Amino acid sequence: MRISVATIFPPYFTGPLDVGLVKRAIDAGILTVDIHDIRRHGLGRHRQVDDTPYGGGAGMVMRVEPLVATLEPLADSHRVLMSPAGIPLDQTVVDRLATLEHLTLVCGRYEGVDQRVIDSHIDEEISIGDYVLAGGEAAALVVIEAVTRLLPGVVGNPESVAHESFRDGLLEEPVYTKPAEFQGQKVPDVLLSGDHARIASWREEQRRRRTEERRPDLWERFVARSDS
Ligand code: JCQ
């Protein structure tokens, strides 16, 4: 898979792409990431990429020309703008993005992007959550990491990807490792029992409890599905 990123801050990506799972995927040739500096297409001697909003108001808006010049050569890809106004990113969206041959992630800055860029050169807007970032770069990295771990050959055991949290709409159960007791805190007896049926039903119960308590939105959907 190829992921192109359009940004005014290329150095933002150097560290995160050089570490861990993403680095392994790139080194193995499973993933290619290319960074496109929007400012290379900036206007005038100062390579300007933003301007004041028509109609007035605070802040700056990203101009059409530098973004369109950046995106024109990437027309063969699925172009996603990271934006608080986008559709919420969830595992279903990640699964879909991971099937693409070529994905482009566009990082906005300032107060937004001129709507004409979105109308003519963006296929989809995606949000990573209901908060506002200074720019789309951190959001793009979230997408890159979530997508990369789904690419064939990246995670050693495909079973662990298929059977993880969110596949069935529930949060994961609490997990423990050695030692069996730490500063008076004990690992639940059932996990040391060797009774695999009891362990499985304990885990399932923990997942339901947690989901009901912490994520009423997910719990409602889970219950609705179990009923039908
Ligand atoms: C992404 N959740 C928050 C900030 C404007 C495109 O216009 C803008 C984009 C950003 C950067 O993205 C986010 C974001 N998901 O803030 C302001």
Image (cartoon, helix red, strand yellow):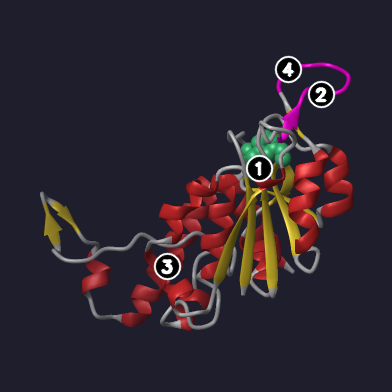
Q: Which residue is mark 3?
A: 23
Q: Earlier in the sequence, mark 4 or mark 1?
A: 1
Q: Residue at x 54, y 46 (%)?
A: 138
Distance Cα–Cα, label 1 vs label 2: 19 Å
Q: Earlier in the sequence, mark 1 or mark 3?
A: 3
Q: Which residue is mark 4?
A: 58
Q: Earlier in the sequence, mark 2 or mark 4?
A: 2
Kind of residue at disc 4 = Ala
Q: Residue at x 79, y 69 (%)?
A: 76
Q: How many marks?
A: 4
Q: How crowded is the residue under tag 2: few (<14 C-alpha within 10 Å), some, or many (20+)? A: some
Q: Residue at x 37, y 80 (%)?
A: 197
Q: In what element is the residue under mark 3?
A: helix
Between label 1 and label 2, give the one nearer the viewer.
Answer: 1
Residue 69 image offset from top left, x and y in percent: 78, 51
Is 224 in front, or is 138? 138
Q: Check residue 53 in the rendering and tell me which mark sits there, or answer none.
A: 2
Q: Residue 103 lies in what quarter of the image? A: bottom right
Is 73 in front, or is 108? 73
